[in-house]
Amino acid sequence: MKVALFVTCLADHYFAEAAADAVRLLRHLGCEVSFPNTQTCCGQPAHNAGMAEEALKMAEHTSGVLKDAEHVVVPSGSCAAMITKAYPALGLGNGPSSRTWELGAFVRRHLDIASLGRGLEGRSVAYHQGCHALRELGLETESIELLEGAGAHVVDWPSATECCGFGGLFSTKMPPVSTAMADAKLDSLPQVDWVVSGDPGCLLQLSSRARRTGNDLRFRHLASVLWEAADGRA
């Protein structure tokens, strides 16, 4: 199965190792992975800012870059939602939208894999549900099933489905509200080894707030955790 990885801006700049782990994981699962090197931003920041013309230009470029991909996998729920939901609304037709998957959904739904070994035995994790993956893509259980299938104990987190306050431009336009949302979410966090999410923006938001409040808890991308489980290094 041929897969093109659309790496996303935040993964490229802040979670490069997680992006590489996504490639390692997909290859481990039998996929032939390519990385179209002319890819740029999916256009979501411009789209959220109401800059329709600029967003369309970026969306058209991305659609062209990914036009020959059999499947497109994205290690970010928000960027996957942009391609699958917003691109058709921008007038691009299906384009890559019908062939694009968020990473956890691709592994669990399309590859139909529920277990990656038991490499996470003894690990307790809290899973943060990113708003775009949960509310736009309808992904509620896929990543949790993969974590549990790898042996992790996914704890009950009362605020798991609450917004972290990142929200792209929201965090820059309304920082006091954004900060309060992140802090409130972290205040409800139970004792765990890791907080895991499939969205780099959410991880950036929560980990930065945790550091500023003196919390040294580890925040990890789903791709890295699943790769370590599959590779037996977790």
Image: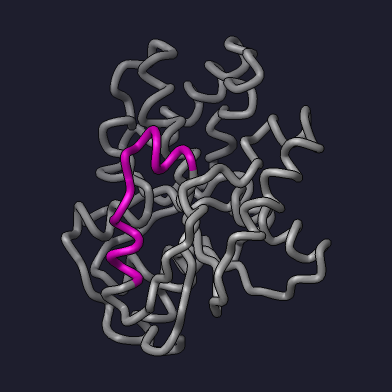
Vertical order, 95 against 211 (above or below): above
Quarter of image, res 51 = top right
Left or right: 138 as drawn, with respect to 200: left
Tell whether 9 sits left or right of 95: right
Name the residue rendered at 47%, 73% in the picture: 125
Percent position (x, y) of residue 94?
Answer: 29, 22
Majority secondary structure of the magenta segment? helix
For image coordinates 65% across by 59% down, the residue present is 186
Where is residue 13 shown, x and y percent of the image? 68, 53
Tell which of 30 and 153 is nearer to you: 153
Which residue: 42% across, 34% down?
81
Q: Is residue 183 left or right of residue 159?
A: right
- Toward the viewer: 130 or 67? 130
Out of 166 and 10, give the one closest to the viewer: 166
> Which stretch appears magenta?
131-147
145 or 35, which is in the foreground? 145
Q: Is residue 221 above or below residue 10?
A: below
Residue 146 lies within the magenta run = yes
Q: Position of residue 23 (x, y in %)?
A: 42, 64
Image label count: 0
Q: Is residue 87 left or right of residue 7?
A: left
- Residue 49 higher or lower than 110, as above or below: above
Q: Quadrant of the N terminus?
A: bottom left
Q: How is the image coloured?
A: one colour
Magenta span includes 59: no
- Give the residue at x 46% y 79%: 124
